[in-house]
Amino acid sequence: MRHHRVSATIVTSGATGRTRWQAFGLSALLLAVSLGVLLTNARAPGPTMPAFLPCYSTGVVIGDLLTAFLLLNQARLVGRLSLFVLAAAYLFTGLSAAIQLLVFPGVFSEEGLLGGGRRVPSGCG
């Protein structure tokens, strides 16, 4: 089986001035809207949501592992060591978040799967 070199990928294709300004504008707009929403509700205490951290950690695990997968594929196509290193970092953070999710008390069992108790999440994250 022969490997074909891809001439243009996300990594090798450069950003134009227009796409940079579009990315900057979209980021600035999202930041302004987020700050506006947060500042209007800054003094009101938020509700207690015990399931927030497990849901957030699940999103981090899925996002980091998918990003690692995509970066590993790009690194294999392009052959850059820097992409392999970046993919390894995403893989590490995804697996670390998965371990934190497993030991977090109240998600899978009252004391966490590894029996760490209530003190584990503060030192595990």
Image (cartoon, helix red, strand yellow):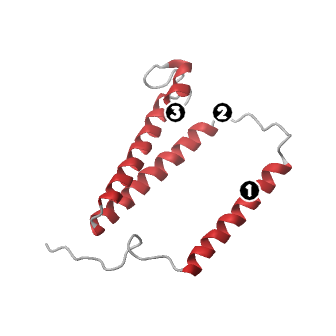
For residue 8, side relative to residue 14 (left or right): left
Q: Are marks 2 and 3 in contact (CB under 8 Å)?
A: no
Disc 2 crowd, CA 10 A, few/some/many (<14, 14-19, 20+): few
Residue 66, by quadrant, is bottom left
- The residue at 39%/48% (across/down) is 89
Q: Is residue 47 left or right of residue 22?
A: right
Say which residue appears at 38% left-offset and 61% top-offset. 70
Judged by depth in the image, the label closer to the viewer, 1 or 2, is 1
Q: CA separation, marks 1 and 3?
A: 25 Å
- Under circle 1, the secondary element is helix
The type of residue carrying mark 1 is Ser
Q: How many marks?
A: 3
**Disc 3 designates what residue?**
125
Element type at marker 2? loop
Taking the spot 42% from the left edge, 49% from the top edge, the residue there is 90
Q: Which mark is residue 50?
A: 2
Q: Position of residue 42 (x, y in %)?
A: 82, 44
Q: Earlier in the sequence, mark 2 or mark 3?
A: 2
Mark 1 and mark 3 lie on one chain; the one further toward the N terminus is 1
Alpha carbons under labels 2 and 3: distance apart? 17 Å
Residue at mark 1 to residue at mark 2: CA–CA distance: 23 Å
Q: Where does the image place residue 54, in percent across and percent down from the top left?
A: 56, 38
Q: Which residue is mark 1?
A: 34
> Could you tell me the amino acid type at mark 2?
Pro
Question: Which sits in the foreground, 14 or 58?
Answer: 14
| In the image, residue 8 above or below residue 54 | below
